[in-house]
Amino acid sequence: MKPGIIGPAHDPQVRRVARRLRELDATGPVVLDLSRFPGSGRASLVDGVPACPGVDVGAVGCWYLRSMPLALPFQPLREVDPHGSATALLDAARRAFAAGRERRSFLASFVAGLARAGATLVNAPAAAAQHFLKLEQLELLRAAGVPLPRTLATNDPEAVADLAASLDGALVYKPLAGGGLCRRVTDDDLRPQRLRALAAAPVLFQEEIPGRNIRVYVVGGRIAASYEIASDELDYRGAETSVRTAEPSDAERAACIAAAAACGMTFTGIDVRRRPDGSFALLECNPSPMFAAIERRTGGAPVTEMLANLLRGAALR
């Protein structure tokens, strides 16, 4: 049996892990790009068994689930006259929604079929889904006893105002389903007319933890690497001013290992905020974290190395 990777071949994480697996075994991994499905990528479930033309899916004993493309890539509605009727545009939007729903249903069952056939998934779909279910993940972390920020998910303006008034420091907000930037709540955000926007959708609010950004990678229940990421922005993604290796404290190490286990994640990147007094809080466990850019900046490949070894070992068992 051999390892496999589900994700686009051009993805930096896929490239690094695939290259390392080829160094360990000249045959290399199977790389399956489901992002092209159903437009140009073909896949089937034959009596529940996954199949792809030209890919020996049954020969893979362990899959690195780098990318689980549940949404359809954006495509302009070329068949619709932009000056046409609102009904035509609405019909096109409904067709796109239905196509996306069918795609999500198929891909979820396809990946489940890989596990049913005996392959190990890193990470399993239930763990990957936590990117969209942040509140469920927070409950798992809370039950594991790891330190977390005070958290409120709500569409109630009064609840937001009460939480902001009860905190000594700042309040931040972010999407419940992931993908968007974390932003600091301003006085303007707390005005009644602004809070009334919560009627459109609930929002996740958390106390802001002051201090240093620490990213900890856990692979197979062990700390693979830990970095301090400096940034002038509240949300450092894409705005890093420096990245350096940073040893986690014993308490941080124990909390991150416990968090990965609680979330059912064989591989995760955990965002930690370390306060000036040395205390800390975990912000979230990422089920498919990026690491290639950090490794390039710091000149090592500890995450790639440990992840590739884990995938190869799991495939051979």
Image (cartoon, rainbow, N blue to C red):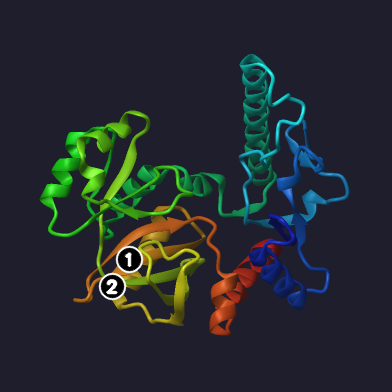
The picture quadrant where one finds residue 191 is: top left
Give the CA separation, mark 1 to mark 2: 6 Å
**What kind of residue is marked 1?**
Ala
Residue 40: in sight, yes or no?
A: yes
- Residue 310 position, x and y percent, is 61, 68
Could you tell me how many numbered marks the image carries? 2
**What kind of residue is marked 2?**
Ala
Would you say 40 lies left or right of 286 here?
Answer: right
Count neighbours of disc 1 (C-alpha within 10 A) and say few if under 14, some if 14 to 19, many if 20 or more: many
- Residue 137 position, x and y percent, is 38, 48
Locate the C terminus and report the quarter of the image it occupies: bottom right
- Residue 247 position, x and y percent, is 38, 81
Of helix, strand and loop, which one carries label 1?
A: helix
- For mark 1, what is the residue? 255
Residue at 73% from the left image edge and 24% from the top image edge:
81
Residue extending furthest right?
Answer: 54
- For mark 2, what is the residue? 251
Would you say 187 lies left or right of 50 here?
Answer: left
Residue 303: in sight, yes or no?
A: no
Of helix, strand and loop, which one carries label 2?
A: helix
The residue lying toward the viewer, choosing from 82 and 142, is 82
Disc 1, disc 2: CB below 8 Å? yes
Q: Is residue 259 above or below residue 244?
A: above
The residue lying toward the viewer, choosing from 198 and 44, is 198
Would you say 148 lies left or right of 71 here?
Answer: left
Would you say 48 lies left or right of 196 here?
Answer: right
